[in-house]
Amino acid sequence: MKDLNYASQRRILIVTFLFVPIVLLCVFSFLPLGNMVYYSTLKWNGYSKNRLFVGFSNYIRLFSDPEYFSVFKVSLYYLAGSVLQLSLALLFATLLTFEMRAKNFFKGVLFFPYLLNGVAIAFIFLFFYKGDGTLDSILKAIGLGDLIQFWLRDVKIVNFSMVFTSIWRYIGFNFIVFLGAMQSIDKEIFEAADIDGANKWHKFIYIIMPSIKKIVELNLILAVTGAIQAFEIPYVMMHGANGTKTFVIQTVDTAFVNGKLGLASAMSVVLLIIIIIATIFQKQYFKHREGV
């Protein structure tokens, strides 16, 4: 009887604690998602009372016009930047795992940009890249004035400028996740490696990387999905001009500039499906690699 009462109380306690998170999840995630799917079947500008049900017409239009997907080529810049970002974060985390001077200072310097608001960072880098701005002044000061370019006006390099800004902002997140994973490794393993004469490279290859493999995979999944969803920095800095328009920026313009909320909702649904497929593909790939 006591066991039965304990089990009932335990179930009531679990349900009570889960009730609020589940309600919040439904209200702020599942309900908006359901509305978005519903809106994608409408021809609607988002504010008028005239809503015309068009079924899958928005999806047909989306897939029949290559213009809507051509902006995904911009995501390739952010995808390449994500690989560089993860590599740098892994490098800095590894260096700061070992003993070095002022390591806490460097941790703060690397993580600080992630604490800043994305809009603020965009405005900071607008001044950084502008003519005779911070970057040009630095290049002139170190005798590299010949390298000065139109950082935001030249179509050939503007996306590199956007990606550099994105790397500067998000590298701190990857860095702190890698560092936390590395510091959770038992120090006795490193001490044993020192006794065996292992250098830092051996420790990285044979101790650190196998221990944080799951974290590397997680960060890689987040980096890929983040590259597909790139929005804040290119939108604030360029509003999609000069070939910086991403799929998310195009979706926002379709909804609020062109007044085609139904089509924009269809684009959002497609983007969600692409992200889910990319995530599943990566997880299956990593699972296959582990099985090999």
Image (tube, helix red, strand yellow):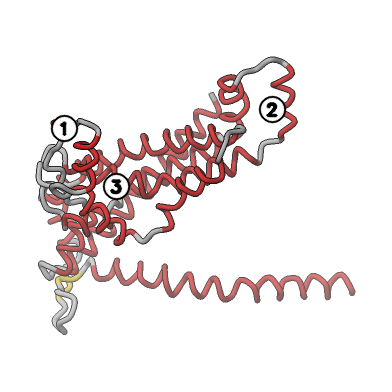
Three-letter residue code for mark 1: Leu
Q: Residue furthest bottom?
A: 49
Callout 3: SS:
helix
Closest to the observer, 176 or 267: 176
Residue sitting at x 62%, y 33%:
99
Q: Earlier in the sequence, mark 1 or mark 2?
A: 1
Three-letter residue code for mark 2: Phe
Q: Residues within 10 Å of mark 2 (few under 14, many from 20)?
A: some
Give the spatial CA distance, label 1 vs label 3: 18 Å
275 displayed left or right of 188: left
Residue sitting at x 42%, y 72%:
28
Closest to the observer, 106 or 29: 106
Closest to the observer, 21 or 116: 116
Task: List the residue tagged with mark 2.
Answer: 190
Nearer to us: label 1 or label 2: 1
- Residue 283 locus on image (x, y percent): 47, 40
Give the spatial CA distance, label 3 vs label 2: 36 Å
Callout 2: SS:
helix
Whether residue 92 is situated above or below residue 113 in the rendered picture: above
Residue sitting at x 16%, y 55%:
238
- Residue 284 locus on image (x, y percent): 46, 37
Q: Residues within 10 Å of mark 3 (few under 14, many from 20)?
A: some
Callout 1: SS:
helix
- Residue 286 locus on image (x, y percent): 48, 34
Task: List the residue tagged with mark 1.
Answer: 147
Task: List the residue tagged with mark 3.
Answer: 165
